[in-house]
Amino acid sequence: MTRTRAVRHLVIVLGDQLDADSAAFDGFDPEQDAVLQMEVSDEASYVPQHKMRIAYFFAAMRHFRADLESRGRTVHYVRLDDPANTGALDSEIARHQAALRPAATIVLEPGDFRVREGLRKLPQRPDIRADRHFLCTAEEFDAFTERHPRPIMETFYRAMRRKTGILIDESGRPVGGSWNFDAENRKGFGKSRPPIPVARSYAPDAITRDVLKLVAARFSNSPGKLDRFDLPVSRVDALTELSDFVAWRLSLFGTYQDAMLSDEPFLYHSRLSGALNLHMLNPREVVAAALQSRNAPLNALEGFVRQIIGWREFVRGIYWQRMPHYADENALDAGLPMPRFYWTGETDMRCLAQAIGHTIDHAYAHHIERLMVLGLFAMLLGVRPYDVHLWHMSMFHDAIDWVSLPNTLGMSQHGDGGVVGTKPYAASGHYIDRMSDHCRNCRYDPKQATGDRACPLTTLYWSFLAKHRRRFANNGRMRNQYVNLERRSAAEIRAIRSHADAIASALV
Ligand code: FAD
Ligand code: SF4
């Protein structure tokens, strides 16, 4: 690092803050201020990480550096292989503060509680600025939960629609007369299916190729593959991906939102979570682009808007309001470790092999694979919720603590006892059979709960309901599930529970 001139403000840009117009740059003067970006090994290894995830972050950071420099901003960029690199955020920041002696260090609030605490403990504490990427501030979320002490996403989402005016007509009512079109958004493919658009591929350029080489050499023992790396890693490519989604996939996004299909990892999903979470895209521009679509029906538009201004903002609010104790929550006392096959995909369960295979190949699986296959099996088996979150942080290119934790520990594992979702997302193999083509190619039978061909998800589902009867039998939203359980005899339930125990012992 060479010191060229006195620095007034040193603006730290973390890997998930790649927005040249963020609040960290308010008042930025290229003549006096400079930027600090750091590739540090600690952040790439505090949990084992998918090679593609590491490469995604570094490639996006290096493209962002090029963007900043093209705007005339000075960037002090610490590469992973820089011999002076100490490997940790705090020591790198301190090293640059000592060398550049800025009058002030500025950073945007990070997306991870652990990192925020680390920044607060720095001897020369930076000025941590609120992040206006999000539509709902922490204060607004607190005010919302004061009005609604048991907050539910639907109420929050309606409040966000009203606040932003998105899909609200002139008289203040929801466009189309309904807040939600979920009933139209649960279609499986059945025998006939519309063509699935080919996913756009972003060939690695010289910057990305350098990163891929570095990651292959330095992280050869990390999980996942690199050979299919074709993610958009610059703002320009992220905008192309947004246009591609609006043009080709949005119109059927709603209808097939919950569907799954063999060897089709993306279907009609947007694949925008990474670009959004690294702030290459702003949620407002993503929603605006969708609303300008000429061919998307209302069920698709509303379904998409709900994810961005509803779920995404809601889980972030929950995370910051409830950390750090949220990470320790384990309402169902689940104590098993993650089964080993989650790292390899080596299992006879076709649905899991497919979802894990997509994850290994692309560091991505769509929402229903994450919730109703990967998460579902772990919850029914009784895996520790925080371990599921750690696995998720390891394997997905879009995982940041604020979004992964409430989705895994909360939504998919019910570890928070009903904060993110009012009931556990518990289902049997029958659900997967309805929503995918997996069961017809599987050695198990989704209708059977005991015996050689019993579908492990079906066995574990009934066992889960029986085990947690006291907790859930009076939950109105689970009434039908318990009515069906009561139809089974005590002997049947005993046999199912003993089969479930055998599945668990064989796996962990
Ligand atoms: P689409 O299906 O096209 O949805 C559009 C956008 O809506 C997404 O890009 C995302 O920004 C947003 N969105 C949708 N659902 C959610 C949600 N529940 N929470 C927050 N944003 C949402 N999303 C992440 O971005 N990072 C994560 O680490 C993450 N972990 C998850 C873990 C589990 C167990 C589950 C069930 C969900 C998780 N999600 C996470 C939410 C969601 O599954 C992903 O955002 C989505 O699959 C990303 O693919 P996509 O961009 O094609 O999304
Ligand atoms: Fe999955 Fe069971 Fe269907 Fe096999 S039968 S694909 S294990 S749900």
Image: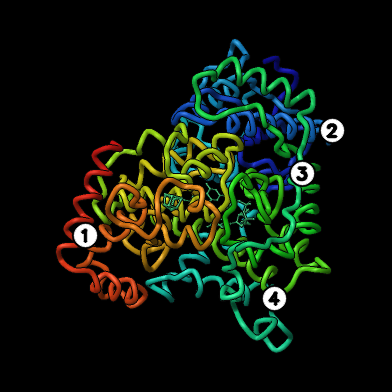
Of marks 1 and 3, which one's residue comes earlier in the chain?
Answer: 3
What residue sits 57% from the left and 40% below the top? 358
Q: Give whichever of 96, 379 is nearer the camera.
A: 379
Q: Quadrant of residue 363?
A: top right
Locate residue 383 relative to residue 156 in the image: left or right: left
Of marks 2 and 4, which one's residue comes earlier in the chain?
Answer: 2
Element under disc 2: helix
Q: Residues within 10 Å of mark 1 (few under 14, many from 20)?
A: few
Q: Amino acid at mark 1?
A: Lys
What residue sits 70% from the left and 38% below the top? 231
Q: Residue 467's mark?
A: 1
| Distance from the alpha carbon under mark 1 to that under mark 2 | 60 Å
Q: Give whichever of 315, 124 is nearer the camera.
A: 315
Locate residue 138 relative to residue 447 in the image: left or right: right
Q: Residue 200's mark?
A: 3
Q: Give whichever of 123, 336 is nearer the camera.
A: 336
Q: Amino acid at mark 3?
A: Arg
For the residues bearing labels 2 and 4, Cβ distance under 8 angstroms: no
Q: Amino acid at mark 2?
A: Ser
Of marks 4 and 1, which one's residue comes earlier in the chain?
Answer: 4
Task: Give residue 210's position: percent from left, percent from top.
Answer: 71, 20
Query: Mark 3 or mark 4: which is in front?
Result: 3
Mark yes or no: residue 8 visible: no
Locate residue 184 relative to residue 375 in the image: left or right: right
Mark yes or no: residue 231 visible: yes
| Distance from the alpha carbon under mark 1 to that under mark 3 | 45 Å
Task: Give residue 407's position: percent from left, percent from top.
Answer: 46, 53
Q: Give whichever of 207, 117 is nearer the camera.
A: 207
